Image (cartoon, rainbow, N blue to C red):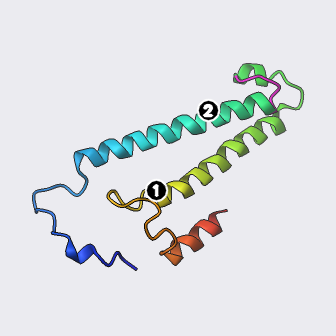
Amino acid sequence: PGDKSILEERPRPKKEPVVLGWMWISMVLNGAVLSAVIIAVYIVALVIYCDGRVFQSDIDQLEGFQPKLMNARTVAFISLVWSENIRSYTSRSFDKPVWFNLLGNVHMQKAIIMAQ
């Protein structure tokens, strides 16, 4: 189901791009922040699971390092999935707040639940 007020908006001019400059900036910043957070989560997970070691050459020297490294990678991956699910709510609209019709799209709710 689409937004009921969409037909009240004026159509964009033919020469106007679909993605405006400020939208590109928003998307790039969103990606940069998400990348930085996931990398930080991975580093923290490495510190926790790999006995304070972060660099691959140091981790390779640990006894039984493969399960420890796998745990850190799993933490980073789960964090990425959860953050993408949250981002799917925040990026639904450029001009409406995130709480506007938050649970209105039933199919989106099903997809997010299945992603978990």
Q: Position of residue 77 (x, y in %)?
A: 65, 47
Q: Position of residue 39 (x, y in %)?
A: 59, 34
- Spatial separation of the CA atoms under disc 1 and disc 2: 21 Å
- Read off the magenta span: 49-54
Residue 51 on the magenta span = yes
Task: Indicate the quadrant where residue 37 lies.
Answer: top right
**Of labels 1 and 2, the one closer to you:** 1
Q: Is residue 9 left or right of residue 48?
A: left
Q: Is residue 24 above or below residue 32?
A: below
- Specify which label sits upstream in the sequence, 1 or 2: 2
Please tell me whether mark 2 sits on a helix, a strand or a loop: helix
The kind of residue on which mark 2 rests is Ala
Q: Is residue 74 left or right of residue 98?
A: right
Residue placed at 41% from the left, 62% from the top? 92
Q: Position of residue 21 (x, y in %)?
A: 23, 45
Please tell me which residue lies in front, 97 or 54.
97
Residue 80 on the magenta span = no
Quickly name the residue at label 1.
90
In the rendering, which numbered label is found on residue 74?
A: none
For the stretch drawn in magenta, the main secondary structure is loop
Task: Indicate the quadrant where residue 100 lies.
Answer: bottom left
Q: Residues within 10 Å of mark 2 (few under 14, many from 20)?
A: few
Residue placed at 74% from the left, 38% from the top? 72
Quickly name the residue at label 2.
40
